[in-house]
Amino acid sequence: MQFTPYLNFDGNCRAAFAFYQELFKGIVVHQSTFGEIPPDPQNPPISPEAKDRLMHVHLKIGAQSLMGSDALPGADEGCAGAYAKPHGMWVSIQADDVAEGRRLFDALAQGGQLTMPFGRTFWSAGFGMVTDRFGTPWMVNVAAT
């Protein structure tokens, strides 16, 4: 079994995943937009401002995945519901060493909001919490040795 974080965005999913792809040295294995959805009389048409938003993106990072999508503008709650900032969750990264933890944390912190600076704690040689510039909350932790 594997758990895969699925992140939601308000129109900046493409930029976020381009950043994550470079930062985590991953490969985008699938990406599609709302404009690529075939027309269906059961569903309302996709608005022009939503056509270029990402409906789904899948980033492979080694044996793991990170997925995401944009919300539809003006949507209500539901499958493709309205965007809401993440609340009550963090995406946790286990870095192999302090240098890698610092690299990841510093990159995620650029233009983001710092919650806890990266540094030594009683459980780790390096730990920090930050919400990146795309609105995703991250915890970076150096694995115990």
Image (tube, helix red, strand yellow):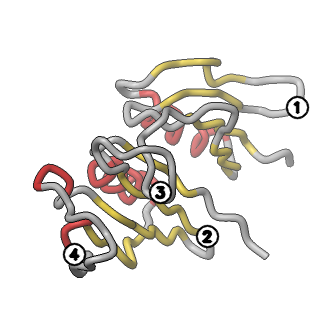
The percent coordinates of residue 50 (x first, y second) are 20, 54
Q: Residues within 10 Å of mark 4 (few under 14, many from 20)?
A: few
Q: Residue at x 20, y 65 (%)?
A: 45
Left or right for 46, reference 63 = left
Residue neighbourhood size for the residue with mark 1, other residues' Cα within 10 Å, grouped as few (<14), some (14–19), many (≥20) = few
Which residue carries the number 2 mark?
64
Residue that carries the numbered disc 4 in the rendered image: 36
* Badge 3 or badge 1: first in the primary sequence: 3
Whether residue 81 is situated above or below residue 112 in the rendered picture: below
Which badge, 2 or 4, comes first in the chain's sequence? 4
Quadrant of the rendered image containing residue 52 = bottom left
Q: Secondary structure at mark 4?
A: helix
Q: How many marks?
A: 4
Image-quadrant location for residue 53: bottom left
Say which residue label 1 marks.
123
Q: Earlier in the sequence, mark 1 or mark 4?
A: 4
Of the residues shown, which amino acid type is indicated by label 3? Answer: Phe
Q: Closer to the N terminus: mark 2 or mark 1?
A: 2
**Left or right of 134: which side holds 6?**
right
Mark seen at residue 10: none
Q: Nearer the viewer, mark 2 or mark 4?
A: 4
Q: Are marks 2 and 3 in contact (CB under 8 Å)?
A: no
Q: Which mark is residue 24?
A: 3
Mark-to-mark CA distance, 1 and 4 = 47 Å
- Give the CA separation, mark 2 to mark 3: 11 Å
Q: Residue at x 55, y 57 (%)?
A: 6
Please state which of the two labelled residues, at mark 2 or mark 3, is closer to the viewer: 2
Mark 3 residue crowding within 10 angstroms, few (<14) / some (14–19) / many (20+): few
CA gap between label 2 and label 4 equals: 26 Å
Q: Are marks 2 and 4 in contact (CB under 8 Å)?
A: no
Check disc 2: other Cα within 10 Å, few if <14, some if 14-19, many if 20+: few
Give the amino acid at mark 2. Answer: Gln
